[in-house]
Image (spheres, rainbow, N blue to C red):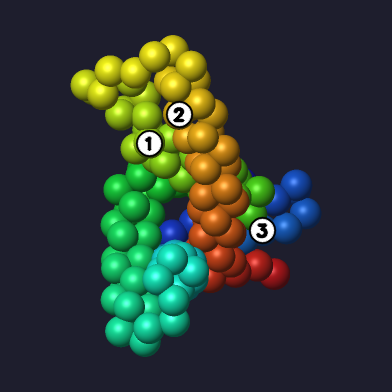
Amino acid sequence: MLHAAPGRIGVALEGGLRAYEASLDRAGLALGAGGLVGGAFAAVLVGVGSGIAVVGLIVGFVIGVLITMMAAIAIGGPVWILCHALELRGPGTAVAVGALAGFALFLGGQTYGFGLFDMPVTDPQTLLFRWMSAVATSLVLALVSALIGWTMWRVAYRRVG
């Protein structure tokens, strides 16, 4: 096992051939980079939904950055700490963590907490279509979350040696 140099968070081995290390300052930069990707996606959605209004795009971008950074800390952070401790630190893990966390977050948000909270009374067919729509939308957003996870990994980790 490789050990981190002073001031480094840790070293990751990828397939036994490549080693990666991260530092606290790079982790902060990674959070900012992930926020920028989320903000850009939010701005695109605002532009598609309401047209190209500069103020709307800026507001959408800023809100997207903030919400993406909060979600990365609150949801992705604990999962990544666990993966980091288990020495699962490669780009594939970052993509998987991003995709799974994003999918779960958006699916839960669209299905009233996976059906645990009160929801409007509907017939079974409407409920089925609501779940199908939620799964489809969450899959699309999981792709964006996977891109955010990869971007954050790419900024945070550097190859050793």
Q: Is residue 136 left or right of residue 56?
A: right
CA gap, disc 1 and disc 3: 39 Å
Which mark sits nearer the N-terminus, 2 or 1? 1
Mark 2 vs mark 3: which is more N-terminal?
Answer: 3
The three-letter code of the residue at mark 2 reads Arg
When the figure is inspected, residue 52 is found, relative to residue 4, above or below; the finding is below
Q: Are marks 2 and 1 in contact (CB under 8 Å)?
A: yes
Q: Classify residue 7 by image quadrant.
A: bottom left
For the point 57% across and 38% down, the residue is 136
Residue plotted at (52% across, 43% down): 137
Mark 2 secondary-structure assignment: helix
The x, y position of residue 161, in whole percent, is 70, 69
Judging depth in this view, the residue of 131 and 36 nearest the camera is 131
Measuring 43% from the left and 60% from the top, which residue is drawn there? 9
Q: Dot 1, how many residues are within 10 Å of its Cα: few (below 14), some (14-19), or many (20+)? A: some
Q: Is residue 157 above or below residue 129?
A: below
The label shown at residue 148 is none
SS state under label 3 = strand
Q: Which residue is mark 2?
A: 130
Q: What residue did someone put label 3 on?
A: 19
Whole-angstrom CA distance, mark 2 to mark 3, is 44 Å
Closer to us: 14 or 130? 130
| Badge 1 element | helix
Q: Nearer the viewer, mark 2 or mark 3?
A: 2
Badge 1 amino acid: Gln
Farthest residue in the left direction? Answer: 118
* View extreme (top): residue: 124
Q: Position of residue 34 (x, y in %)?
A: 45, 66
